[in-house]
Image (cartoon, helix red, strand yellow):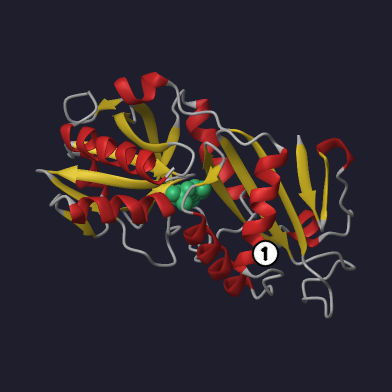
């Protein structure tokens, strides 16, 4: 694969970064994951806006304009033979002697790679996935898409250890999101998802789901759901850019709703797939 590193397009095995990079030493960086369908970066403008918000949140200056980002991203996609890809980009604060204090006059490091997109297994949509619940052990700026993913990794590994595909996170008895996804609960035909604040990542897929619901008269409230309400819900879903919308049918070993992907999920999945076809 060809990757982009600080101005160059080079083979992945030739790409090297300094051990003094603050991404490596401090996890001092932000990132995006952008799905690419048939060579087109899906909802790219929204990802670039969120990147800007993340950079602002950690006070790293954006090294590029949106037009420059778009050119580099499209170039990288083409160099990796277009098709369906998962494009990863990260910006770290750059290379400097190790210190918590920000270095002065240091250029951010920019890295991008684009790998073949592996859609979720068909069974995830026909049968749904298993999830566990766990305490949300993250910091209070989950709205920043930071490369510092140790808490997310620990929580996702708990799911893996339990034979589940995602961990749903509880903070103060309320569902925030998944370890790598936003979360939705359907109660009596009404969809709930936690509001945008410092406790959740503002998912691009989440925004699209909210818009599709509004356009199609599907009731949806941006309101946090309690643990007990979640456990009695008719449906639970997760969403992310690379997984799209996926139903959860087993939670902590208990059947969710009927134990099958729910009707509201079916409807949203159809709308989502249709939207994807239209724009790509
Ligand atoms: N929340 C978290 C913690 C995530 O890691 C992700 C995906 N990276 C999401 C939500 C979903 O965001 P998006 O739809 O933009 O992929």
Observer-nearest residue: 31 or 115?
Answer: 115
Observer-nearest residue: 106 or 252?
Answer: 106
Residue 108 position within the rendered picture, expressed as x and y whole percent measured from the top left: 77, 67
Residue at 61%, 44% in the rendered image:
87
Q: Can the viewer see residue 72?
A: yes
Up the image or down, 53 lies above or below 131; here it is below
Locate the C terminus and report the quarter of the image it occupies.
top left
Residue 59 position within the rendered picture, expressed as x and y whole percent measured from the top left: 65, 76
Q: What residue is pinned by disc 1?
A: 68
Locate the N terminus and report the quarter of the image it occupies.
top right
Residue 96 in the figure: left or right of residue 185 = right
Q: Dividing the picture into quarters, in which one does residue 268 lie?
A: top left
Residue at 59%, 74% in the rendered image:
56
Q: Secondary structure at mark 1?
A: helix
Residue 119 in the figure: left or right of residue 62 = left
Up the image or down, 232 lies above or below 215; here it is above
Residue at 57%, 41% in the rendered image:
154
Q: Can the viewer see residue 127?
A: no
Total count of labels? 1
> Mark 1: few, some, or many residues within 10 Å (few <14, many ≥20)?
few
Residue 264 position within the rendered picture, expressed as x and y whole percent measured from the top left: 18, 38
Residue 227 in the figure: left or right of residue 57 = left
Q: Dividing the picture into quarters, in which one does residue 100 lie?
A: bottom right
């Amino acid at each position: 694969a060809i990757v982009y590193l600080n101005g160059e397009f080079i083979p992945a095995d030739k790409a090297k970064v300094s051990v003094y990079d603050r991404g490596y030493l401090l996890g001092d960086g932000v990132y995006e994951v952008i799905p690419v369908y048939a060579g087109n970066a899906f909802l790219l403008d929204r990802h670039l806006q969120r990147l800007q918000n993340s950079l602002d949140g950690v006070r790293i200056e954006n090294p590029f304009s949106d037009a420059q980002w778009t050119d580099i991203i499209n170039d990288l996609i083409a160099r990796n033979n277009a098709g369906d890809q998962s494009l990863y980009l990260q910006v770290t604060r750059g290379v400097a002697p190790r210190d918590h204090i920000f270095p002065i006059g240091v250029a951010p490091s920019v890295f991008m790679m684009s790998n073949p997109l592996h859609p979720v297994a068909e069974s995830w949509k026909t049968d749904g996935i298993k999830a566990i619940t766990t305490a949300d052990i993250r910091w209070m700026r989950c709205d920043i898409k930071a490369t510092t993913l140790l808490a997310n990794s620990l929580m996702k590994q708990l799911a893996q250890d339990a034979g589940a595909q995602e961990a749903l996170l509880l903070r103060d008895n309320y569902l925030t999101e998944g370890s790598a996804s936003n979360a939705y609960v359907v109660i009596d035909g009404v969809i709930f998802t936690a509001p945008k604040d410092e406790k959740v990542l503002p998912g691009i897929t989440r925004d699209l789901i909210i818009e599709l619901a509004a356009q199609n008269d599907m009731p949806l409230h941006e309101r946090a759901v309690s643990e007990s309400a979640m456990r009695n819900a008719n449906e639970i879903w997760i969403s992310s850019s690379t997984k799209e919308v996926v139903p959860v049918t087993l939670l902590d070993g208990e059947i969710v709703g009927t134990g099958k992907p729910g009707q509201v999920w079916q409807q949203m999945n159809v709308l989502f797939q249709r939207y994807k076809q239209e724009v790509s």
